[in-house]
Image (cartoon, rainbow, N blue to C red):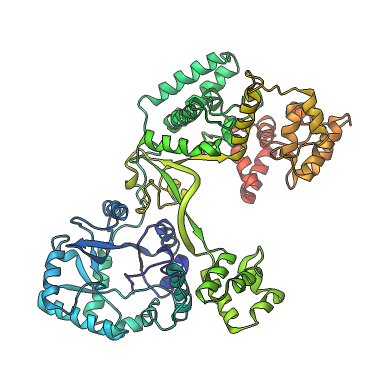
Amino acid sequence: MIHLNVRTAYSLLQSTIRLEQYVLQMTERGSRSVAIADDAFYGVPTFLSYCQRYEVKPLIGLRTVLRLDGLDVSVIVYSSNETELKEQYRIIQAGGIEGRTTMPLIVLPENWKASDPVHRRRLYHQLLSFVDEEKLWLGLPAPQTTEQVQVLKQLRLMREELAVQLIPAPETRYMRPEDVEGFRAISAIREGDVMSNEDVRQKGLHVRLPSEMNDWFTTEELSELDRFEALIRLDHLPRAEGAIPEIPDADQKLKRLVGERLKAMELVKEPYIERAKFELEVIANTGFSSYFLIVEDIVRFARESGIEVGPGRGSAAGSLVSFALHITEVDPVHYGLLFERFLNPERVSMPDIDLDFEDERREEVVSYVLSRYGHTHAAQIGTLATFGAKAAIRDVARALGMTLEEGQAASKQVKAGGLDELMSSQKQMKWFAGSQKRQQLLRIAKQLEGLPRQSSVHAAGVVLSRQPIEEVTPLQPELEEHVTQYNMKDLEEVGLLKIDLLGLRNLSRLRKMEDLIRESDALFSLKTIPLNDARTYRLLARGETDGIFQFESTGMKQALRQVKPTEFEDIVVTMSLYRPGPMQFIETYAKRKHGMPYQPVHPDVEDVMRPTYGVLVYQEQVMKLLRKLGGYSYAEADLVRRAITKKETGTIARERERFLQQA
């Protein structure tokens, strides 16, 4: 039996229902369909994935208001197709229904005078100006209080008077009757108040059993649930028509721009020409030329505005096109970086270029992107903060009326493993066993741990869309900025492409240092600092690196003293090896660098391993060895590299056999 008025934890601080637990329980009860009716769509992609996993039909409802002559009537609208889902997106952004709709609509009798027959008739006829009669239902509450019994009676009178359609829609906020405690706590946290055990309206809002529904509603009323369910035929989110705004003649514009930039850098020579042709062909075939032009435009704006831009990070540094466009500042041909790590023609996935800007001026870049591509096609990415273990303890302590000192003392019992680890430790549990209120605190906090608490804006992400973005994701209604309700992962699932615009404090510091130095040396530039300065390498070799990003830890200083770098590649190797696992090879690399003889594993691998003295340091070296010894293409080698990094044992075993056969 389906429940149509279910708010989940994604109606922030209004429910404690966890999606997977809810979908699973309804499946175990034999339901063929599961419905939600949140006031926001943060959880819709997750809900659909659980429905697919447990093989049940999803019904996506939106709890909102219908604006009627100054009265906001509480309603739930359900989307039966993709067009209506997009209409729900628009309603979320508008904050309510203001015009006619084709969606099935359930009116909740929460703030209108059901007991006044004149008011009832007038309201019902006004509703018919917004929705067709066959798509309009009045939701029946569970008759658990005197008021609800009276409302139920009056609604049934309306059916006799006006032939209106009635459907069971009891308010549902938590899974089991005993979960009322957690719901009371989360309600108190929302209101900034102390929990009340007296509010009878908070009781009985659990997911009802079929026997309870049969006791409250008639056979005719319950049969409406099946008829309503049959109207819904939507089980997926619509995909974006294109990942990013399309730039006319993007392939030719990108090719021309790359050629001009390579010529300006005096790199119109082999192997640069061949590499550029290959990359441009892959980019064009995968449809990402517009993406590169957009990223180039963003970086150019920042540089022309005097905003410090990072040199590039991650696999994007393996792209010569990125280097030519000044998106990155690392020459991938010179340093032996591979394009296939960034964009693999045999496993097309969204390119991911992270852009770093000085943190004090990052907002200027975000504003430029939003204005350049318009609020219709660009938005910042939303995210949800959840109740951590310590925060849940502190919030519930306040809701229970405990003192600030008691709440702090309780949160101090929580360690890195969260409440599960705490509850398995006799030592930590000893504090909570000190009183019934402390035990209640822990019990309720455990119910809330991990639930969404509040919405916020992703620290870096911006998303672009070829079609109007409100057709692909709902947007936050209460914020002036355009912010998506779907998170970064969900947006990628529907086919949108994110761009990370990160703010780095160190870039702000570097710019300020450069400005200070220019007061005495007007020609100084960070870009012209030589990479072969002997005094700098002597300083690094002594481990005198306080305040230098990634080099200031005690362990890294020790590694630098061992390696005693004399060239830039030594610095890169040291940083690459200084992590769990490879760290054991730092001493080997250092000794070989300073003259300890070593025997190459095989003559055919010496040219790949020579730069790192026979120590396998880089993922690019793995790919080159697979190509040289096993006959893999770089694209195939990248797939093996990914399997190794993700520890996909099945793929590794298959590729091992292939490698041994071909080597």
User: 380 or 466, which is in the foreground?
Assistant: 380
Residue toward you, 460 or 633: 460
Q: Position of residue 303 (x, y in %)?
A: 51, 27
Quarter placement of the N terminus: bottom left
Location of residue 518 in the rendering, given as x and y in whole percent from the top left corner: 63, 23
Q: Tell me: residue 85, above or below residue 531.
A: below
Kindly give the residue lying farthest to the right in the view shown: 596
Residue 452 visible: yes
Q: Position of residue 651 (x, y in %)?
A: 61, 47
Name the outermost residue toward the front. Answer: 519
| Residue 348 visible within the image | no
Q: Position of residue 216 (x, y in %)?
A: 29, 84
631 lies above or below 171:
above
The quadrant of the rendering that contains the C terminus is top right
Across the whole image, how many numbered discs are drawn on residues? 0
In-image side of 476 versus 163 (left or right): right
Q: Residue 105: name its quadrant.
A: bottom left
Quadrant in which residue 605 is drawn: top right
Q: Is residue 191 above or below residue 130?
A: below
Q: Toward the viewer: 483 or 76?
A: 483
- Is 498 placed above or below 135 here? above
Direction from residue 489 to residue 156 in the image, left or right: left
At a point 58% along the width and 32% down the height, the residue shown is 310
Q: Nearer the viewer, residue 572 or 436?
A: 436
Q: Residue at x 80, y 36 (%)?
A: 544
* Residue found at x 26% / y 54%: 84
